[in-house]
Image: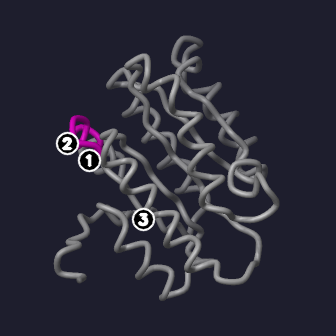
Amino acid sequence: MHKKIQSLISSVKESGAHIFYSFENEEKYVDNLIVYVTAAIGLGNHVMIIENDRIMPELQKRIKAEFNEKQQEMIHTINNYEFYCYRGNFNKVTILSYLENMLAPFLENNIPIQTWAHVEWRDQEEIVQNLGDYEKEADAMLQTTNLITVCSYDANRVSESLKDVLMDSHDYYMTDDNIDLIDRKSRI
């Protein structure tokens, strides 16, 4: 998987990519995240990681062990609960505004950045519709910035209907062991 992630990041560094990652194994998930960060830093890019409280301690431990001080300054972490539930529930307008504000200093100063977001939500009505709308608008925003971003989802929380929606708003589908290009045209 190491080579697949590095190859993908290298191949989309100019055009950007929106990657849907459905993970099942938390250990492989963290390994893949570290490979992603390594590839980004190898290109001279900063990385913004939006992650939960449960995984963050292991992630911080790995960052400290595997990256030098200068590289660590290129890695920015945010609690995903604060990011996705800033106003108490999953609200796409609030989240997209928050994302734009976080990325603005990098984009305005031509500082290359990639993102990795572990998407989580509270149980709420119409969450599939809300997630789908959010991902479609995020995809449109990302296409104008040529960012490389991974949107990771715990496979246990992704229904078939949500997976279909997510496949329609991403360029690549990633699992713990593979990455495939999504042919959006054939999905229409």
Q: Is label 2 in contact with label 1 (beta carbons under 8 Å)?
A: yes
Residue with the mark numbered 2: 11
- Give the residue at x 65% y 35%: 77
Q: Which residue is mark 3?
A: 136
Lower sequence index among marks 3 and 1 = 1
Query: In the displayed structure, would residue 143 be above or below residue 132?
Result: above
Task: Using the image, determine if residue 69 lies above or below residue 13.
Answer: above
Residue at (59, 46) in percent of width and height? 97
Query: What is the spatial separation of the Cα atoms under label 3 and label 1, in whole angstroms?
Result: 22 Å
Magenta stretch?
A: 8-16
Q: What residue is disc 1 on?
A: 8
The amino acid sitting under disc 2 is Ser
* Mark toward the viewer: 3 or 1: 3
Residue 123 occupies quadrant:
bottom right
Q: Position of residue 137 (x, y in %)?
A: 44, 59
Horizontal side, residue 163 vs residue 70: left or right: left
| Residue drawn where x is 38% and y is 57% of the image | 139
Residue 63 magenta-drawn? no
